[in-house]
Amino acid sequence: MRLAIYILILFLSNINLLVAKTFISQDITQNQYWTQQKSPYIITNDITIHAHVILNIQAGTEIQFSSGVTLYVEGSIWAVGKSKKPIIWHGFQDNNWNGIVFRKGKEKNNIDTTINVFRYCQFEGKDYIPAQLILAEARHIEMENCKIQACQTALQSEKSGYIYFKKSKINQVYKAFHICTTSSMKIEQCKIENFVLMLVNGSLDFKFNKINKSIARGQHTGLVIWLIGGGSVVIENNEFKQAAEAAFTLYKSVRKSNIQVANNQFKKNKIHIALSCQYANKGDFKLKDNTFYKSRNTPILILDDCIESIDTISLSPNYFVGLQMPKQAHKLKIEHENNSVNNPQRLILEFEGFLKEKPKFTPLKKI
């Protein structure tokens, strides 16, 4: 008899765990701790975490959003999962949701400068929605061992916002990230694939990443540098593979820009590098010690017409493998000439000197 009662109690307890739900419909005005036991937490309408309020989320917790709902964060979130117990963020009953917006509080003198932290979190959109899954407006966000998929823009920083994204993955998105003017990101040891665009209008520190399968859709694809307000861009020790168009594009820069592309490997892209004839010599642009394997079209493409009679882009040492040119180019000079409207444009690759030693690269870290 006692055994039967014990089994019945255990059965009812398990049922209670299976049907446990917590509905959230009010702003969070004081510190809260969300647990796995009470999840999923279903956010039914737009809510705000107020400034100086912390939402802590336990490993294994699931957060769901009703259709069209946005979570605004003026305080901070600490969502620390585990490798086998990630924190899941997605739409309720497979609905579309509108992402998480980190912003300043409404009161000018009541700004929360606390860092927001996500570790071992999985974010899932649907049909390229949310438009911005993580949006940092003048806020600081750190993300590690996270996964983002199936949204329009995975990460966006603006209004001096900053995002640090490490050992994480982005898959099946339109824009992997968008750094707006005056904002910045640091991305390292990440894997980004099946995307259209990574757009840089601000500052970027981009190292030890694996970039695979950028899709051709629209005018610009791959990693695009488009600086109109200046910025510092460092792209080092990355692997760019299987881009449908250009893997890297320097589209626009200004004199106060600093761009360094070094020690990267480019493989099986249609075009490895695309450069603007007009803007490549503006600011401080360095392309050095990269390895360019055989491309499906051309290793380096000049994007635009040169208004001047001849515009020359001088590049530092780079390495070419499997191409009909020297395998080690000590100096690469590109001359691009547009003789007339009716004549085809001319691209001249001129090599000066050779390197005897093979290129040495810092190996990509395992992701």
Image (tube, rainbow, N blue to C red):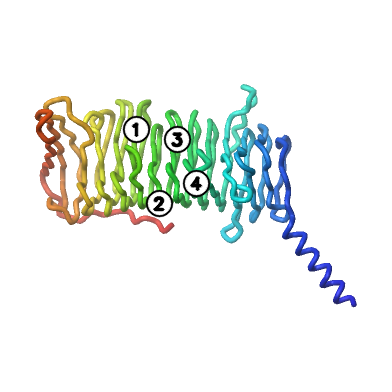
- Secondary structure beneath dot 2 equals strand
Nearest to viewer (mark 3 / mark 4): 4
- The amino acid at mark 3 is Ser
Disc 4 crowd rating (10 Å Cα; few below 14, some 14-19, many 20+) is: few
Give the residue at x 58% y 31%: 103
- The amino acid at mark 4 is Asp
Quadrant in which the C terminus appears: bottom left
Q: Are marks 4 and 2 in contact (CB under 8 Å)?
A: no
- Secondary structure beneath dot 1 equals strand
Disc 1 crowd rating (10 Å Cα; few below 14, some 14-19, many 20+) is: many
* Residue tagged 3: 184
Residue 241 in the figure: left or right of residue 296: right
- The amino acid at mark 1 is Trp
Label 1 – label 4 distance at C-alpha: 27 Å
Viewer-side residue, 319 vs 8: 8
Residue 295: percent from left, percent from top: 22, 51
Q: Residue furthest right?
A: 1
* Residue tagged 4: 127
- Secondary structure beneath dot 4 equals loop
Label 3 – label 2 distance at C-alpha: 21 Å
Nearest to viewer (mark 1 / mark 4): 4
- The amino acid at mark 2 is Glu
For marks 3 and 4 on the same chain, the one whose residue lies earlier in the sequence: 4
Residue 126 in the figure: left or right of residue 301: right
